[in-house]
Image (tube, helix red, strand yellow):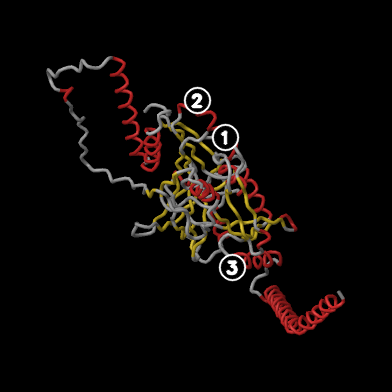
Amino acid sequence: MKKFVMAGLAGTVAGIIATTQIAGPLLAQEAESKADVYQQLDLFGDIFERIRAQYVEEVEPEELIEAAIDGMLTSLDPHSSYLSPDDAEQMRVQTRGEFGGLGIEVTQEEGFVKVVSPIDDTPADEAGIEAGDFITHVDGESILGLTLDKAVELMRGPVGSEIVITVVREGEPDPFDVTIIRDTIKLTAVRARTEGTSVVMRVTTFNDQTFPNLQAGMEEQIEEAGGIDKVNGFVLDLRNNPGGLLTQAIKVSDAFLNEGEIVSTRGRDPQDGERFNATPGDLAEGKPIVVLINGGSASASEIVAGALQDHRRAIVVGTKSFGKGSVQTVMPLRGDGAMRLTTSRYYTPSGRSIQALGVSPDIIVEQPRPAPETEEEDDRPARSEADLRGSLNNDSLSEDEIRQIEEDRAKAEATAELREEDYQLAYAIDILKGLSAFNPDGPSQ
């Protein structure tokens, strides 16, 4: 027993000696590093005082400090920034679902302001702004080299005022101007409607109202259809949805999953990672789901699409999503300002990071651009056997059977019209029709 204790003691003493030998240089390096930091802070103080004393025009010290803080944050990544008290309040209002502006979500890419997506039924959307557009000038003033917040500030203004933005678009040979009238942006988080026997849930953003709107919209459409048995499936339309609250993305994903991981986040410290799991209950009651995405689907939209795709709960259709796989934490600061800081990356249930890669659809379906109208259109109706003079009647079908055929034909024609208007959505509905055709318990088509 004494030998054991002594051996332990000897090991402890040896450990202390070894630690001392190693810790010496480490402590010296740490002290040197701290000294370098303090020297840099002294340099910052010197520059601050020189600007305040010798700059050609008098500047407010508070504005200098805010600019320095913002520069420090924006140098990290496109999504970290300083929020002045006014900006912080506007962000809180936007999260609640109503704010003033153009109605576009933007990011910064190599110094250029890039449109992530226009928001449905807003001035920017009605003016034809598209996901992927680059904004180069605001009212003739170049915004190249400005921080994202400064560029956004130039685009803000009183409701009803006019703004002219210059846009560079892929496929267009030259930049072009777009005139937009600023308006109050009221975000309707979810719009629900029924196409045939398919329920379409258009989710435009992830704010405080998203999950409640989704749940209420689904319940209303199911009731109007005559029950879940009369519905062949659901389309979750996340196109041009720039994201929003992580908590709402988790709730929307959970709405269609009974179990399993929804998303995980991992920061610099492994101990700070979090996992979010689904709880029992599926609003769609097992009915097929098609998720629509495109290059304007970002952040929270990608969490939902990735979770439902990994769990094989939905078929993802459209084009590759934006690829924003990072999480920002808004931290209040003294003076009512705030700091938006990227604190972690998120991962889909299979462990894949979407950052810069996006979600790849199971079925790639491009949205064709409208074809230019030709001067001469052949509007003559197609002729059939029934149009011929003296053609024989079909006496093998009852009136009810003929009526059913006519109803089915009307549905097919409605789908064809939808295909002209929104090809991707029509494709998604066709998938649900195809799946229900193999389900004997599904509604008739």
Q: Secondary structure at mark 1?
A: helix
The residue under label 2 is which amino acid type? Gly
Q: Residue at x 34, y 47 (%)?
A: 368
Q: Would residue 118 be found to the left or right of residue 150 on screen? A: left
User: In terms of depth relative to the viewer, which is nearer, 322 or 152?
Assistant: 322
Q: Earlier in the sequence, mark 1 or mark 3?
A: 3
Q: Earlier in the sequence, mark 2 or mark 3?
A: 3
Q: Which callout, 1 or 2, points to the residue nearer the camera?
A: 2
Q: Are marks 1 and 2 in contact (CB under 8 Å)?
A: no
Q: Would residue 2 be found to the left or right of residue 177 on screen? A: right
The residue under label 1 is which amino acid type? Gln
Residue marked by disc 2: 227
The residue under label 3 is which amino acid type? Ser
Q: Which callout, 2 or 3, points to the residue nearer the camera?
A: 2
Q: Secondary structure at mark 2?
A: loop
Q: Position of residue 240 (x, y in %)?
A: 47, 48
Q: Position of residue 369 (x, y in %)?
A: 34, 48
| Residue reaching furthest to the front | 1
In the displayed structure, would residue 101 be above or below residue 73? above
Which mark is on residue 75? 3
Real-space CA distance between mark 1 and mark 2, rounded to the nearest whole angstrom? 15 Å
Q: Secondary structure at mark 3?
A: loop
Q: Residue at x 71, y 64 (%)?
A: 62
Residue marked by disc 1: 215
Q: Which callout, 1 or 3, points to the residue nearer the camera?
A: 1
Tally of numbered tags:
3
Q: Residue at x 45, y 47 (%)?
A: 293
- Look at the image and tell me in which quarter the C terminus lies: top left
| Residue reaching furthest to the left | 390
- Look at the image and tell me in which quarter the N terminus lies: bottom right
Whether residue 99 is visible, yes or no, is no
Q: Position of residue 320 (x, y in %)?
A: 43, 53
